[in-house]
Amino acid sequence: MEKLKIEPPGWIRKGDRHVIWESEKSPEGSEDRILRRFHFVIIDNKNLEGKMEKILKNCNDASIINFSFDEVDRVEGEVTGTDLNYLYVSYDSVCTPKYVSFKGVAEKSRRDSNLIGRKVIPVKDYLKRTYGPNA
């Protein structure tokens, strides 16, 4: 698994735990089955997997539908100059963004359209450029 060193964006203090996320139409979907691709980056110092599972559970708890989330991509690493780590995970699902909740996961969160993987800069390069030591 690839590991990157990142720094937090300007809207948050360097040592703060937070989540950035975005969704887009998945290229794996079809006319019969419309899929969304969700991108999540969790910045914290412990239990990143548990926090990711909690986000997915929150989606299912908010709906009468039990959504499945198929993992597409994953990157983890350290946040430069802190004791924090990060976990980036991308999923395909029929879930819609209105069901995404960070209750019990993070007090600070925001959407970041730069996480969309189909832009000119791939997501992993965006993480390196935005959060890396040379940013």
Image (cartoon, grey):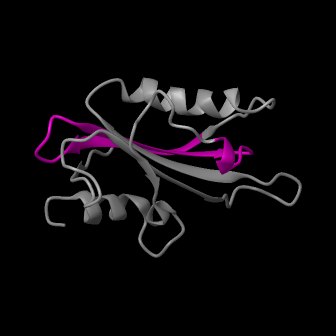
Q: Position of residue 66 (x, y in %)?
A: 76, 29
The residue positioned 25% from the left and 30% from the top of the image is 45
Q: Is residue 1 visible?
A: no
Magenta span dominant secondary structure: strand
Q: Position of residue 121 (x, y in %)?
A: 41, 71
Residue at the extreme bottom: 120
Q: Quadrant of residue 17?
A: top left
The residue positioned 73% from the left and 34% from the top of the image is 67
Quadrant of image for the N terminus? top left
Tell me, yes or no, whether the highlighted magenta stretch contains residue 89: yes
- In the displayed structure, would residue 113 be above or below residue 62? below
The residue positioned 44% from the left and 28% from the top of the image is 51
| Frontmost residue, 54 versus 32 | 54
Residue at the extreme right: 32
Residue at the extreme left: 81
| Frontmost residue, 114 versus 105 | 105
Q: Position of residue 86 (x, y in %)?
A: 31, 40
Quadrant of image for the C terminus? bottom left
**What range of the chain is rendered magenta?**
71-99
The residue positioned 10% from the left and 45% from the top of the image is 81
Left or right side of 64 for 113 = left
- In the displayed structure, would residue 104 be above or below residue 10? above
Q: Position of residue 99 (x, y in %)?
A: 67, 41
Q: Quadrant of residue 105?
A: top left
